[in-house]
Image: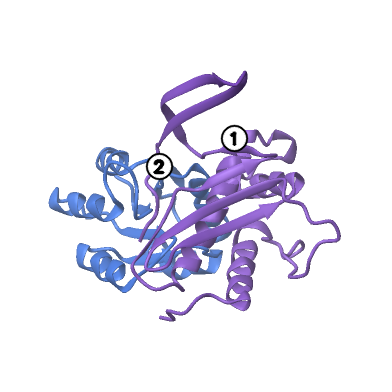
Chain colours: A blue, B purple
Amino acid sequence: MSAVKILIADDSRVMRQIVTRTLRQAGYEGHDLVEAADGRQAYDTAVSERPDLVLSDWNMPEMTGVEVLRALRAAGVAVPFGFVTSESSDEMRQAAEAAGALFLITKPFTAESFRDALDPILG
Amino acid sequence: MNHTTPTDDDLRVIAEQVWSSYLDLDGASPLIAKPADAPSHEVCASVSVTGAWRGHVVVRCSAAASRNAAAALLGVELDDVTPDDVTDALGELANIIGGNVKSLLPEPCALSLPHVLVHGESGYPQVMEVCGLEATWLDEPVTVSVLESTVVERVG
């Protein structure tokens, strides 16, 4: 697998660290990881850094994850985008799918759940 | 989705999932569902639930367990764990468990920001003081603080 750039957007530094570690455990090593601590940063970083994949929390300051996704699509940025959230109501899944998200991983997640969601994109 | 009050078994399953996912990655140090010989409540992390159901989800543990949790969650050496690490890590732990408990409660509900107590001292993960008052009453100290979160809570 050639190195790809993954943007991790979460307002919790603990959760960004857990996502980073889980990516490594799932076998996605050697990739270029960039982080964003709020929705605005996530949008700006997705535009400027042109990542190959965005893993985003749902609720973040400045912009929610789904607002980031909608703004990216409105700006013509088609980066693969998935959510990593602590809850997943039917409404959230529908909104995520309608906005163009590829997957929604719920916490607590495992390396296996990352592989299931990410292999079709990065594999 | 189940809309009854969570049971002991529900909580055990949630906690075991959180531990196996984040705190016991190699399966060598699982959360064992039986009381410790010497229970400790040195560290207490909680989130509140409001809405159709109202209450609190509380995680209590010893100082040593909280430091181990912070080291595991943040991927740092035990000796390098700071008090802020403990506050952030235990707050996130309460948040994740609270989020999963919330999925078993009637809708709509919202989770509060986490609150962490270490040795009786309040800790609020990722906040800034907006204003404060340090005062004296009957020759005893009284303080009032307004703390704004720099984090938007995961409510749904």
Instruction: Provide the residue designation for mark 1.
Output: B84
What amino acid does circle 1 point to? Answer: Asp
Determine if residue B145 is in view. yes
- Mark 1 Cα shell of 10 Å, populated few (<14), some (14-19), many (≥20): some
Q: Is residue B134 positioned above or below B146 on the image? A: above
Sequence-first disc among 1 and 2: 1
Q: What percent of the width, then of the height, locates residue B143?
A: 52, 26
What amino acid does circle 2 point to? Answer: Val
Q: Residue drawn at (44%, 44%), measured in percent from left and top?
A: A32
Q: What percent of the width, then of the height, locates residue B154?
A: 39, 54
Q: What percent of the width, then of the height, locates residue A100?
A: 23, 63
Determine if residue A28 is in view. no
The quarter in which the N terminus of chain B is drawn is: bottom left
Q: Which mark, residue A20?
A: none
Instruction: Provide the residue designation for mark 2.
Output: B151
**How many marks can you see?**
2
The quarter in which the C terminus of chain B is drawn is: bottom left
